[in-house]
Image (tube, rainbow, N blue to C red):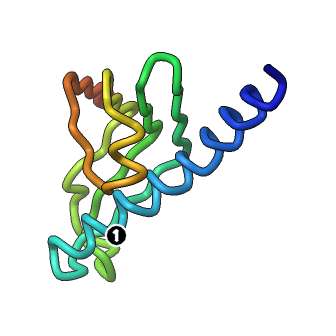
Amino acid sequence: SGLLLLGLVLLAIFAERLVKDELNAQLQGNTAGVYSLNVEDLSVNLFTRSIVLTKIEVKKQNDSTSIDFLNAQTLAFRRINLLQLMLEKKLHIKKLQIHFHRSD
C-alpha cells in the first residue's frame, strides 16, 4: 500500500515535467520554433485524469512587441489517458476548458 502510494506520487511528479516539456516541444516543433509556451504552474491529477495549466502564454519568440497568440488564466484537460500520454506520447482529450483573463 505504501509502495503504491509512493509510485503514484513519483508518477505525478514525472508526469508534470513530461507534459510541460512535451507541450512546449510540440508547439515549437509544429511552428518551426516561431511560438513558445510559458506556463506558470502545471498540475497533474492522476485520480481525476486531468492536467491543469495556470497562467498560460503562447507568443512569438524573439518579438517582445508581438501580441500574444494565447493568454489564458487556466487551461484544463479533463478525462485524459495519462498512461497513453507517458508511454506513447499521445494526448487524447475528452474535455477542454479555457478561462481567459478578463480585461476591465
Q: Which of 21 and 55 lies nearest the eye of the viewer? A: 21
Q: Is residue 69 left or right of residue 3?
A: left
Q: Which of 62 and 30 lies nearest the eye of the viewer? A: 30
Point out the image quarter for the C terminus. Answer: top left
Q: What secondary structure is found at the residue carrying circle 1?
A: helix
Q: Position of residue 75 (x, y in %)?
A: 34, 33
Residue plotted at (61% across, 42% down): 11
Q: Position of residue 79 (x, y in %)?
A: 31, 22
Q: Position of residue 14 (x, y in %)?
A: 60, 51
Q: Which of 62 and 80 lies nearest the eye of the viewer? A: 80
Q: Is residue 25 left or right of residue 30?
A: right
| Residue situated furthest left in the rendering | 31
Residue plotted at (27% across, 73% down): 28
Q: Position of residue 27 (x, y in %)?
A: 25, 65
- Figure check: 78 above or below 82: above
Q: Quadrant of residue 101?
A: top left
Point out the image quarter for the N terminus. Answer: top right
Q: Residues within 10 Å of mark 1 (few under 14, many from 20)?
A: some
Q: Amino acid at mark 1?
A: Ala
- Figure check: 33 above or below 58: below
Q: How many marks?
A: 1
Residue plotted at (17% across, 81% down): 32
Pointer 1 residue: 25
Residue plotted at (34% across, 73% down): 64
Q: Is residue 99 visible?
A: yes
